Amino acid sequence: MSRIVTVGAAQLGPINRSDSREAVVTRMLALLAQAAESACDLVVYPELALTTFFPRWFLNDINEADHFYETAMPNEATQPLFDEARRLGIGFCLGYALRETDAAGQVRRWNVQTLVERDGTQVATFKKVHIPGHESNEPDRPFQHLERYYFEPSPDGFGVWNAFGGRIGMMICNDRRWPESYREMGLQGVEMILCGYNTPLHYAPDPSQDRLQGFHNTLVMSSGAYQNGTFVVGVAKGGTEEGVPSLAESTIFAPSGEVLARAKTTGDELVVAQCDLDWCRSYTGTLFDFDRYRRPEVYSRLTAQRGVVIDEASP
Ligand code: ING
């Protein structure tokens, strides 16, 4: 009996700094209604889906950014989404900024995704692991990418959870560029990875990459899917947001690495694919049978080192 998950990548177009959460949730509900018409089991929204991508601005007092963060999920603004999804029997994955106070009374700020099952139960909340960009104000940039100022990196790493009849994992944006992200989940038997992203087309440290943003986006998720025998659902906040052109191209990848479905616009758009999770075994049970073919005994550098080490003694 095949295990088909009908997944909807719910791409969002730009969210303006002045847009209310209620206005954004209304857009998300429209995509959810489309997902119901397509008999989706699961809808995936982008990274930081409730607000504009605020790390593009430096605020000297970080507490002035508090209003961009959620302090609870669900909350008043998102309860309608949780209620309607449960009524429709559709699960979803939602990206947002989370601000919380820990046991020591410290304020913690995370870039997260929450996975919700079809009956409304919260399966897990994942914290972004790889935080790109820079830590301090760089006013010379045409726009900033201050994620390392506004968010901490996850201490938890990558998880995989039993949901939607299979093994579901999560990663956020820059995580998709690191092969370690996929393999950490692959070694937990992941069958579908959910990934929201906000990716400006312009990359200030190396503008030669600008023309390659779409190619790199496809390259990393297609490779990660194939090399770990998993579906990958990449979902953009695309279009020109507060003057910053951002990559759309939301895509659903098969364990073969093939594109199953891709967005045609840079705005709000639902991209749907029927994903038979049993397809994964065609790869994890053959070419990528990790237990049979991997050689962790010779991979020691992968966890022992952060950066490059040159062995001067070697020829
Ligand atoms: N954004 C980007 C990403 O990894 C980035 C950072 C921007 C990388 C532009 C390369 C070019 O897609 C997030 N939010 O991680």
Image (cartoon, helix red, strand yellow):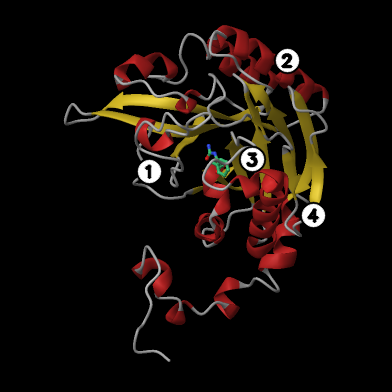
Q: Residue, x 45% and y 81% (percent of image)? A: 298
Residues under numbered marks 3 and 1 in contact, where contact means CB atoms less than 8 Å apart? no
Q: Secondary structure at mark 3?
A: loop
Amino acid type, label 2: Ala
Please name the residue that numbered disc 3 is placed on: 164
Please name the residue that numbered disc 4 is placed on: 258
Q: Residue, x 66% and y 18% (percent of image)? A: 28
Say if residue 166 shows up in the picture.
no
Say if residue 158 shows up in the picture.
yes
Of the numbered discs in the image, which one, if any, rests on residue 30?
2
Q: Earlier in the sequence, mark 4 or mark 3?
A: 3
- Mark 1 neighbour class, 10 Å CA radius: few under 14, some 14 to 19, many 20 or more: some
Q: Residue, x 58% and y 72% (percent of image)? A: 290
The quarter of the rendered structure image containing the C terminus is bottom left
Amino acid type, label 4: Glu
Q: Earlier in the sequence, mark 2 or mark 4?
A: 2
As drawn, 151 above or below 19: below
How far is the residue under mark 1 from the one under mark 2? 32 Å
Q: Earlier in the sequence, mark 3 or mark 2?
A: 2
Front tag of 3 and 1? 1
